Image (cartoon, rainbow, N blue to C red):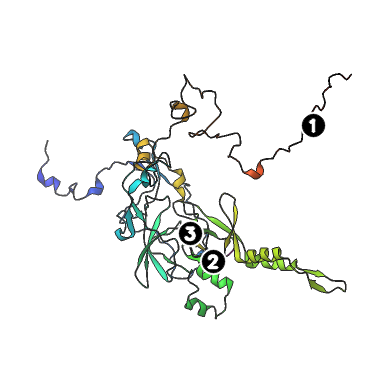
Amino acid sequence: MLQPRAALRGISLPFRCLSSLPFRVYSTGAQQHPESPSPAEPSSSTFDPSIAFAPPPTREDSGVRIRKYTPRTPGVRHLRRPINDHLWKGRPVHKLTFPKRGHSKGGRNNSGRVTMRHHGGGHKRRIRTVDFSRDAPGPHLVERIEHDPGRSAHIALLRSKDTGKLSYIVAADGMRTGDVVQSYMSGIPEELWKSMGGVVDPGVLAARTAWRGNCLPLHMIPVGTLVFNVGLRQGKGAQLCRSAGTFATLIAKGSNTRSNVTEEETYEGEEGTEEKKPLTQREKQKQERIVQHVTIRLQSGEVRLIHKDCCATIGVASNPNYQYRQLGKAGRSRWLNIRPTVRGLAMNAADHPHGGGRGKSKGNVHPKSPWGLPAKSGYKTRPKWKVNKAVVVPRVRNQGKRRRGYS
């Protein structure tokens, strides 16, 4: 039975109060409205000793933050995505991008031949021009954090406070809109020189410069700091630790190891006086190399010597939960320019050395690559210095045998 119009005057209509209506939830995880204010982040415009040195990335009490979806369709049943609600929802800056065209998406070279298998297709993309050298001095304001389809880590849009120029960099974990970052690759600013009294104070210099997202030469970074976007050559951009969640640890600098080397040069003479032992040419070169280089340890455990003037960014590369993602379906791999990988055992004999035959059979051949090279048993699969070379012993003729006619 219909109610009279007077009884409906105190009830708000659905289109005037949308919050009173029930809504359907299609995913789980912490969600935040794009217009709601984000949690306050420590601004780098004022000095705070507690956040001066970039600590390891903070983890929530809930652990890894992954969004799961209600299986409305089979393609989203196993879909897992890291929660990154702080990312920009719009398009990138057009003048900082260029289209990805040509044979590069299909794994082919300039002559049209396939040089990289399992590549092809994929969604249309625009390459973001990322500044890996960061030569521009002065403070830069982080306009927003964006998703880059060409890399696993996120990128940050910077605007120079001096010139107003826009540029993209690889964002550090924890970087948010409104942060201020700076590059010291061109030298120490005049204001910092005056605050230190015209003399380099390592403690003050580290406290004022070793902030998350700042780009510094390796010799200005304190020992034990986590860095990413590490360069390999002077004057060239970053080449190491650019993927999501990667970092390197600075474990030693030339200034710290030089004192140990000089102590070994002195020895006590016959009369009890300390005398300096002359160094050989090789020892001088080794000492000079140690002084001019910095030692870093990668996540794989590899220890490398890199020149002290190479660039590095303080912190850890953004999007550390990227490794826990699940695509959910095969079609999403095709969107990412990844073609299917077929086992050689399932191919025909004309396509692979393991192919052909009746049933599951390799055709009685040793494991080989698609081009016929041995794939196991140590053939080009282990370093040469680990392989023990066999000692060739000259064979003596008729050794250990009874000669005919002798008892």
For disc 2, the marked residue is: 309
Q: From mark 1 to mark 3, how far is it between C-alphas?
A: 60 Å
Graded by Cα atoms within 10 Å as few (under 14), some (14 to 19) or many (20 or more), the crowding at tag 2 reads: many
Specify the farthest residue to the right: 407
Question: Could you tell me which secondary element the residue under label 2 belongs to?
Answer: loop
Between residues 258 and 59, which one lies in front from this camera angle?
Answer: 258
Report whether residue 36 is seen. no
From the top left corner, tell me how far across and down residue 248 is, in percent.
54, 56
* Quarter assignment of residue 162: bottom left
Residue 133 appears left or right of 285: left
The residue lying at 48 percent from left, 75 percent from top is 189
Give the label, 1 or 3, closer to the camera. Answer: 1
Is 39 colored magenta in this rendering?
A: no
Query: Could you say which disc has been placed on residue 285 in the image?
Result: none
Is 342 above or below relative to 48? above
For disc 1, the marked residue is: 396
Q: Which residues are magenta?
A: 217-223
Nearer the N terminus, badge 3 or badge 2? 3
Graded by Cα atoms within 10 Å as few (under 14), some (14 to 19) or many (20 or more), the crowding at tag 1 reads: few
From the top left corner, tell me how far across and down residue 25 is, in percent.
32, 42
From the top left corner, tell me how far across and down residue 138 is, in percent.
42, 71
Q: Quadrant of the C terminus?
A: top right
Report whether residue 335 is seen. yes
From the top left corner, tell me how far across and down residue 249 is, in percent.
57, 57
For disc 3, the marked residue is: 238
Graded by Cα atoms within 10 Å as few (under 14), some (14 to 19) or many (20 or more), the crowding at tag 3 reads: many
